[in-house]
């Protein structure tokens, strides 16, 4: 296996648990409470602020134009696609981005963003990549599996969000990001690679906790 195949394989049980979480299952079946979904969108909005900050720090630490472009391309997706969808859902809750600023993070959200910011502040590019990539790659995995099980979700209230993360262009971007991670990490020594796998796994665990939080199961991790 390639390095990234090993990395993802090590986190697969966490990705499987996320794909089969109560929140995702209810979304697919069309039984997810709308208020619960909108609460998730609020927490996701708070999360994305620090996610963007982590990328900003990564761009500052980048040594090459290619590194800057990789991090910038993810932010571009968040701003151009995910942000538009998110704002539409927030408006359904009677909220704007300015309103969200005054809403506290739930513990799982705060733990995840704290992990991202700490990693971005203290570590180098390979470590930062391992911290941020489970969000982008994991969402593609979760929603691809969701559509395979419940294709009708694309025509539901949740369809716009699911389409953002299952579009062919997004899938291609995930491949590009994965290939870049492979390139950035392939020549590192074995001890460093083990550290990177653990960071990726920790981020994947935070992803799972976030889905569990969205489903009503708060996790203090």
Image (spheres, rainbow, N blue to C red):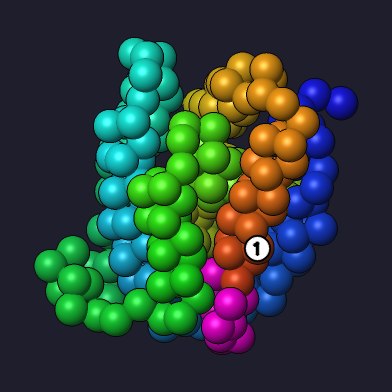
Q: Is residue 64 above or below residue 215?
A: above
Q: Is residue 211 magenta?
A: yes
Q: Residue at x 36, y 36 (%)?
A: 58
Instruction: Give the residue furthest to the top.
Output: 65
Q: Is residue 176 magenta?
A: no
Q: Residue at x 34, y 31 (%)?
A: 61
Q: Is residue 161 above or below residue 130?
A: below
Q: Quadrant of residue 144?
A: top right
Question: How many numbered discs, if any?
Answer: 1
Which one is nearer the viewer's eye here, 192 or 6? 192
- What secondary structure is marked by label 1? helix
- In this picture, residue 138 sits left or right of residue 111: right
Q: Which residues are magenta?
A: 210-221
Work out which quarter of the rendered image holds the C terminus and state it: bottom right
Work out which quarter of the rendered image holds the N terminus and state it: top right
Q: Is residue 30 above or below residue 204?
A: below
Residue 175 visible in the current orientation: no
Residue 195 visible in the current orientation: yes
Which one is nearer the viewer's eye here, 163 or 209? 209
- In this picture, residue 219 sits left or right of residue 195: left
Q: Residues within 10 Å of mark 1 (few under 14, many from 20)?
A: many
């Amino acid at each position: 296996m390639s390095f990234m195949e090993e990395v993802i394989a090590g986190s697969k049980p966490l990705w499987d648990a996320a794909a089969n979480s109560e929140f995702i299952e209810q979304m697919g079946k069309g039984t997810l409470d709308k208020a619960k979904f909108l609460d998730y969108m609020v927490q996701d909005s708070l999360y994305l602020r620090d996610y963007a900050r982590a990328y900003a720090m990564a761009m500052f630490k980048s040594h090459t134009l290619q590194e800057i472009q990789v991090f910038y391309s993810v932010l571009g997706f968040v701003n151009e696609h995910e942000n538009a969808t998110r704002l539409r859902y927030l408006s359904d809750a009677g909220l704007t981005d300015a309103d969200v600023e005054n809403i506290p993070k739930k513990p799982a959200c705060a733990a995840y963003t704290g992990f991202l910011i700490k990693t971005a502040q203290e570590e180098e590019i390979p470590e930062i990549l391992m911290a941020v990539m489970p969000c982008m790659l994991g969402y593609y995995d979760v929603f691809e599996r969701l559509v395979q099980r419940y294709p009708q979700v694309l025509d539901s209230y949740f369809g716009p969000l699911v389409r953002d993360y299952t579009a062919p262009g997004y899938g291609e971007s995930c491949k590009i990001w994965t290939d870049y991670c492979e390139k950035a990490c392939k020549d590192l020594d074995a001890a460093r690679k083990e550290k990177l796998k653990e960071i990726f796994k920790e981020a994947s665990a935070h992803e799972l906790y976030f889905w569990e939080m969205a489903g009503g199961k708060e996790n203090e991790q």
